[in-house]
Image (cartoon, helix red, strand yellow):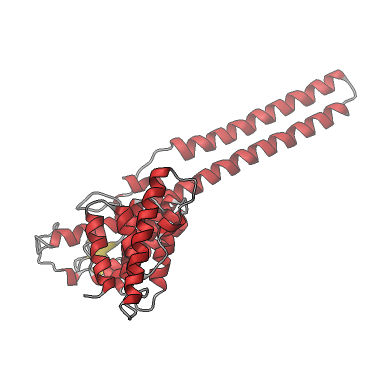
Amino acid sequence: MSRAQQLKDDGNRHFKRGDFLVAESLYSQAGCFSSIITIITIITIIAIIAIIAILAILAILAVAGLFGAGQRDYDSNNATLYTNRAIARLKLELWDSVVADCESALALPTATDASSLKAQYYLCQACLRLGDPEAAVAAGLASHALCVAINSTSLAAVTDFVLHAKKARWEQRERQRIREEGDLERDLLRLLRAERDKDAAAAASDDERRMVEEEAAAKEESLRNTFERSRKLSGEGKREVPEWAIDDISFCFMVDPVMTKNGHSYERVSIMKYLRHNPYDPLTREPLAPSDLRPNRALREACEQFLFENGWAADY
């Protein structure tokens, strides 16, 4: 067994025990990477500094052992080492480092579909925590496509994160819309008041000035009422998910609908789980196999558009 493989296996054992900091260091040694431990600043608490010192010594001894063996026994081109370290860093909430590891794994020409799937999945989670839902959606969709391509059992978990990412993207855009709407209302009110002051100053009599002020007050009230109605419609309107977007098995909003040979559509995750135990259509009871399923692209586009405009539906 190579030294790199031994370090990787040791890292896996520590990860399973919940020793994520040690696992991260071992994965780093296996690939001859720079561990995140070496970049923790000096202002960290004394206990962490002590751990850094111990792990640094172990890393030096390990690297010395690699060169002492007289061979290049580490593997910096192994995508699995990057993804293993990425999940350890996810547990440690080192979001930027997770992104770096995932991007490194994806850049390797030797990366397998399974490794790329993991890298995109972890990247989706890290981008969400970093407040970048657009990147999270892109990574989540890429991970989902790989899940479908290799028939991965991670499809349900990946689909769930795709929904979370799309909801986060909608919430970010909704916050921006609310800010812009508020700015517009304030700008229009300032223009109305400036016009009122100008017309009042030019009024020939007190009666004319009073008329100008009354008209301006009426315009302000109308403007405020218009914006208030808009806020109520966007925030308190009736929220309903159309029946065509609801999966008949899980009753959840569909992300990746597939169609049977009889024209019925289901969420891919739901129907694949169902067919593992029941080889027939849940509605018609006719024989059905995974190979009979086809992507319903028109329905998927309709679901994506609805979710884009109504991000709250992700929680349906």
The residue lying toward the viewer, choosing from 30 and 196, is 30
Residue depicted at 64% across the width and 28% down the height: 221
Identify the residue shown where x is 17% and y is 68%: 290
* Residue 227 position within the rendered picture, expressed as x and y whole percent measured from the top left: 58, 36
Residue drawn at (32%, 68%) of the image: 30
Number of marks in picture: 0
Specify the quadrant of the image occupied by residue 187: top right
Residue 31 or residue 87, whichever sits in front: 31
Q: Quadrant of the N terminus?
A: bottom left
Q: Position of residue 304 (x, y in %)?
A: 39, 57
Q: Nearer the viewer, residue 139 or 240?
A: 139
Q: Quadrant of the C terminus?
A: top left
Across and down, in percent, residue 117 comes to: 32, 67
Q: Residue furthest right?
A: 204
Instruction: Inspect this view and state whether residue 119 appears.
Output: no
Q: Quadrant of residue 6?
A: bottom left
Residue 179, position as x, y percentages in the image = 58, 41
Q: Is residue 69 left or right of residue 272?
A: right
